[in-house]
Amino acid sequence: MQYQLIKKYLEVMTDEQTLVVNSGHPIGLFPSHKNAPRAITTNGLMVGMFDTLDGFHQAAAMGVANYGQMTAGGWMYIGPQGIVHGTYITLLNAGRLYLGIPDDGDLSGKVFLTSGLGGMSGAQAKAIEIAGGIGIIAEVDKSRIETRSEQGWLSRYSSNLDEIFHWVEDHRSNGKSVSIGYYGNVVDLWDYVVQNDIKIELASDQTSCHDVYGGGYTPQGVTFEEGRELLRSDRKKFNEMVDKSLRKQFELIEIMTKRGSHFWDYGNSFMKAVFDAGVRRIAKNGENESDGFIFPSYVEDIMGPICFDYGYGPFRWVCLSGSHEDLAATDKMAMSRISPERRGQDRDNYIWIRDAEKNALVVGSQARILYADALGRVDIALAFNKMVREKRVGPIMLGRDHHDTGGTDSPFRETANIRDGSNVMSDMAHQCWAGNVARGMTLCVLSNGGGVGTGKAINSGFGLVLDGTERVDTIIRLALDWDVMGGVARRAWARNNHAIETTIEWNKRLGNKGHISLPFIPKEGLIEELVQKTLGET
Ligand SMILES: NC(=O)c1ccc[n+]([C@@H]2O[C@H](COP(=O)([O-])OP(=O)(O)OC[C@H]3O[C@@H](n4cnc5c(N)ncnc54)[C@H](O)[C@@H]3O)[C@@H](O)[C@H]2O)c1
């Protein structure tokens, strides 16, 4: 019903009205003005004391709260290419960070061991191939392997580890990329590489560890189907097996990291699950989670400092004409606006967009994702709006994923590399949303949860329709820049180096048109010295 109403309102509304949607309920069409957003939506925003999982389930059962998720909450779901692009960038940057791969290099000859060919994790197979490496991905559910294989994301698979490692050696010597599925348990895969002393350069895990006892993780010793049965018939035994399996997986990973493998947590709560299974030494302080865990996490160490702090994030667009020629023309235009020699990140994005058509990731809408920083997003958007003005393409809707620099406050993911204590706050996401409303984005959305869960994140999204007008050129210059730089500014306040560099450049570029305040960084140990001095004097 709500869907039908929203559709109807969108059909009849004028450009002097704004549609208001509260948690999926179209409240109505309100008079506004041409430069106001055409739709403002909020999802699952709960009052503080009720903002818990239980509170959400009760409200959802009464039909007053919905789960906004991330991208879908901004009415711009573009299928799996977003996650493939993000994973590709994570893998390349992990190679740079941990293996010293040069900016213009790729992962050829390097092995990435991981698990999961499911919803998001399935992107690992396609991404490792685009990044030029050798991926071995364990998956217990045959149907998931078959889906990825039929889709062409997984080059080959086997349940025979000897056979798999013959393939790996072939690819190490010929330098060609490949993604190999292991039909079996990831703990058995780790066991094999430890026993056979096989070199693994990069490793992670994408089993659904955010829900280990609910079936997200199949323990070693049972097949996927047996695991499901056990979960139904003997939950206590299932839980014990899960704990034992997680402990064993950790011990094997520990051995491999001592031998030189680089393991990182992929935002799936793997380290928390291992800790809950009884492994205290996975906590940095050996006691509790307050100081974090011993392995790096992908946002904290890779995406945060290397992408978000510079402002690089998942810019995207949809060609509203539905025409593939329009998408091909915009791909070409976007590529011509990137200088691959500027930074490693630009080079990765250039290669991504150059090969986008070949990688055939479009499903449904004619959409593209392309990581870009504030300068890049504004530049590409202006070029697109000009194409629309000149009638070279039909109208385009711009947006972005929420896995980005400025739109999302999520201490377990997007803002995990903000370490000044402010990552428990959600001011940034609210400011981002309000700023986008004020600057005239077409659609502005603010949601609770998304990706990590209710009460754990607030995220703001937008959509901007490029109609070719100069009015939209102005919105592009003001709003797209704000959308990114609000986040960079907050990261600079948290004293993140790359955000400070990016802010200094922005201040210079803007002159007296704008200014972001910068932190004054005292010398290391100053506070301790002052405290000691004061204590000594009393
Ligand atoms: N890809 C990303 O960028 C990203 C970002 C944030 C979080 N995550 C997290 O990654 C996890 C995976 O997400 P998803 O959407 O792919 O979930 P999913 O449940 O669809 O896929 C996980 C897969 O792991 C398999 N699996 C479970 N236990 C296994 C085991 N012991 N050995 C081998 N395979 C096993 C399952 O059969 C399943 O197919 C989630 O916890 C998610 O929150 C991913």
Image (cartoon, rainbow, N blue to C red):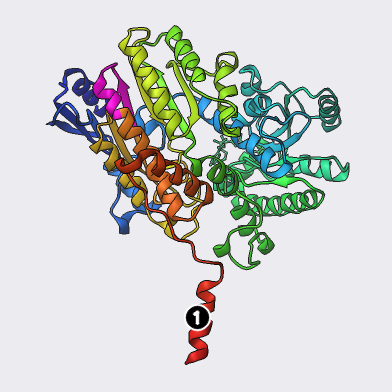
Query: 390 left or right of 246?
Result: left
Task: Tell me where residue 129 appears, x and y as whole percent.
Answer: 68, 25
In the depicted structure, whether residue 211 falls above or below residue 24: below
Q: Nearer the viewer, residue 38 or 221?
A: 38
Which residue type does callout 1 highlight?
Val
Mark 1 highlights which residue? Answer: 531
In the depicted structure, whether residue 175 falls above or below residue 326: below
Q: Residue at x 43, y 37 (%)?
A: 402
The N terminus - image quarter: top left
Query: 508 left or right of 61?
Result: right
Q: Residue at x 72, y 31 (%)?
A: 107
Please tell me whether residue 27 belongs to the stretch shown in magenta: no
In the depicted structure, whether residue 343 falls above or below residue 251: above
- Helix, strand or loop for disc 1: helix
- What span is in magenta? 462-475
Task: Tell me where residue 200 appears, x and y as whole percent.
Answer: 78, 40
Q: Quarter of the image holding residue 283?
A: bottom right
Q: Nearer the viewer, residue 238 or 361?
A: 361
Task: Tell me where residue 398 appears, x and y as whole percent.
Answer: 37, 25
Label 1 Cα crowd, 10 Å radius (few <14 / some 14-19 / many 20+): few
Query: 216 left or right of 106?
Result: left
